Image: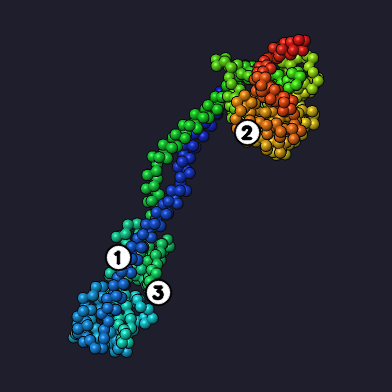
Amino acid sequence: MIMQSKHRNLRIKFTALLVFFAPAIISMPYIEYESRTLQEVSALKIGKVILDQAELILDQVKFNLQRHEPSLTIPCAEWAKKVRLLPYLRSVFVLDGNEIFCTSIADNINLATISHFAISGDAKNEFSIESGGPFSPGKAVVRYQAITSEGLKMIGFIDSQYFRDILYAPAWEGTESIILHLNSKQLSSNDAYAADSSLTNFYSMASTRYPLKIDVYPVANAVSNYRKDLLLRWAPWMIMLGGVLGLLVNRDLKRRTSIKSELASALTEDEFFVCYQPIVNSVTGECVGVEALLRWEHPLQGLVSPDLFISQAETCGMINDLTLHLFKCIKRDVTNILFPKEFHLSINISANSFDSPVLISELEGLYVALKKMNIGVVVEITERQMAKNDDVTQEAMQRLRKVGIRVAIDDFGTGQSSLAYLQAFELDYLKIDKFFVATVDCPSVNTPVLDAIIELGKRLGLKLIAEGVEDETQAEYMRSRGVEYLQGYRYARPMQWVALECWFKSRLYS
């Protein structure tokens, strides 16, 4: 017993510990998802800002050069003076065919030295990246070209430094590298042309107006940093929630264990006994049966409500033990007195008890013992738990009915399984709950429900038993509507077997 108690306490502590860590365990997938989402949102936000700034540079260059379009009728020096003041442009060349017509560079420049470069390059795209400009061959530039209204080719060079400034990775926290793609070429925050090829995790933002795309590569530990931040932020709440849940589970398990131990002790000390409430014929008033009701006389608390200890027994898994003890008490109580024909004894069985072969066998044994005294057995299925409509339950029902045990549905109409029972199982009796019987004295919206239950029972060919009949008005109402049997304080309260014998004999010989 001591070892069992130690093992039980260890199981309770282990379960409570698991529950304590449950919020953290459950939160981990969400934290991982949120960390990756934050990385993505941050990277896309950076990409959007860089894309907007890059588009702004291209927009201004394009707008300014279109506004200051060169002309064969405008002197080159006058045009160049205006163009030199335009932002972002390092140099601008105007070509007439393959000859340089004008340039924004100083007037005394030897044009022959740049003619070859000016007419080379990508002639297909409006904007492109090239390896260098006329006077900075080793430094990447962004080239703009357009054809004027007079057929002149206008080529402008933008220093790549403007783009590298907005790409500069240290300026953007949490990024390893940022790459600007323009057509088939690229600029990097770390290098003029290429990023680290080993980086594979990136997020992209593309322009809708230019062949421009920004790739943002987060640092390798970005997700872990977000994860740590979220864990630190949520840790106090997870600890508090885990602590509360752990305490609640620990208390509940101890309570259940305590209840189970107390019920087991009560069975050992024989603190349970049975009371029997008569069931009478509604027309003749003759006692035709009794319902066996288990009672608990607690040594300190006195009589414990059946609604309390039966539900607790179902919760902690001891309902079958109580039912088997009920059978034992009935065998000990019942004596062979002169009962009328078709007299029966009703026993409440939990819906889940049909899964127990031992209980079914003991019930058959009780039936055999009572049959010798001309007493039939009726099993009342309670609705606290829904009976499973499976092969095991159906087989148990058929087995009981085959030996002569009849089946009733108890407290009909108060549970969610009432109609399901009528469809799933073969029944003999339908017991109308006292809640509906009480509506006879105080008519309400439930009174039509009572009439519907009675009519339903008749159509199904079931015998009807009204529970909780307390006065003649209720008895007459049931009698007038063809309810065969009545049970309640109007006739007798639950009593122990010795008192029942006296009550029965007094009615028999009066």
Q: Kindly state the secondary structure of the residue where label 3 is placed.
A: loop
Residue 42 appears in which quarter of the rendering?
A: bottom left
Q: The C terminus is located in which quarter?
A: top right
Percent position (x, y) of residue 251?
Answer: 49, 29
Q: Please tell me how crowded label 2 is: few (under 14), some (14-19), or many (20+) other residues with Cα within 10 Å.
A: some
Amino acid type, label 3:
Ser
Q: CA distance from mark 3 to mark 1?
A: 20 Å
Does residue 33 appear to the left or right of 79 in the view shown? right
Q: Nearer the viewer, mark 2 or mark 1?
A: 2
Whether residue 380 is visible to the viewer of this picture, yes or no, is: no
**Distance CA(mark 3)–CA(mark 2):** 73 Å
Name the residue tied to disc 1. Answer: 166
Where does residue 329 sit, x and y in percent of width and height? 69, 18
What residue appears at the point 30 percent right and 65 percent down from the top-left corner? 166
**Circle 1: residue type:** Ile
Residue placed under numbered mark 2 in the picture: 415
User: Could you tell whether 445 is left or right of 250 in the image?
Assistant: right
Q: Secondary structure at mark 1?
A: helix
Please indicate, yes or no, whether residue 508 appears anywhere in the rendered image: yes
Q: Residue at x 43, y 48 (%)?
A: 31
- Disc 2 vs disc 1: Cβ atoms closer than 8 Å? no
Whichever of labels 3 and 2 marks the residue nearer the N terminus, that label is: 3
Assess disc 3: are there few (<14), some (14-19) or many (≥20) residues with their C-alpha within 10 Å of its C-alpha.
few
> Which amino acid type is marked by label 2?
Gly
Image height of 392 relative to 319, above or below: below
Query: For mark 3, what is the residue?
Result: 184
Disc nearer the start of the sequence (3/1): 1
Badge 3 vs badge 1, beta-carbon distance below 8 Å: no
- Residue at left offset 53%, top offset 26%: 255
Which callout, 2 or 1, points at the residue further toward the start of the chain? 1
